[in-house]
Image (tube, rainbow, N blue to C red):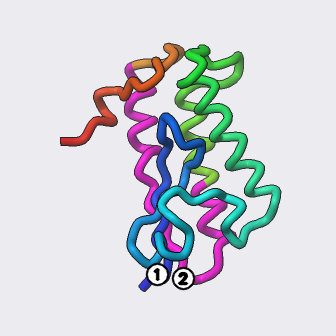
Amino acid sequence: MAAYKLRFFFDNIAGVCLWAGDRATMERFDYPIGLAMLPITSDLTEAGGSLIARWERHVYEKQSWPSGDSLSVFARDCRAFVGQLQSALPDGYEIADEHTAKLISAAEGNEGAPLARGWTPPSMCTG
């Protein structure tokens, strides 16, 4: 059983991509979890920061994906980052990727279109 449960997803305000998934994790890290709080290399922290910056640039600034980038590419990069993060963390950490599959689904219908601030693709809505 994992000692710390992390949830991977982007929020339109917080500037983080990891969140506490249970009480023990929240007590240790708080609800939003900054990458610098984790026992990972600075390179991996920077890679996560780059993903967050790409998300914010696209969502907050309503910019189209730059040449060579797209929602599909971003989703693949997110999936790779979560895998690297899981491999880098010591035993006792578990990551639930709650965003990448939704990004891939959204990309199938919205390739190249900017996401408006606060807009959630229908495939990402719950309930």
Q: Which of 26 and 88 is in front in this view?
A: 26
104 drawn magenta: yes
Is 64 above or below relative to 59? above
State which quarter of the image contains the C terminus.
top left
Residue type marked 1: Ala
**Residue 61, how many percent across, how many down?**
60, 18
The residue tagged 2 is 92
The residue under the point 45% across, 36% down is 103
The residue tagged 1 is 2
Q: Check whether the beta carbons of the residues at disc 2 and disc 1 lie within 8 A of each other.
A: yes
**Residue 12, how many percent across, how many down?**
48, 34
The residue under the point 69% across, 18% down is 66
53 drawn magenta: no
Mark pair 2, 1: CA separation: 4 Å
Dot 2 falls on a residue whose secondary structure is: loop
Is 45 above or below relative to 124? below
In this picture, which residue range is highlighted in magenta? 82-109
Residue type marked 2: Gly
Residue 22 occupies quadrant: bottom left
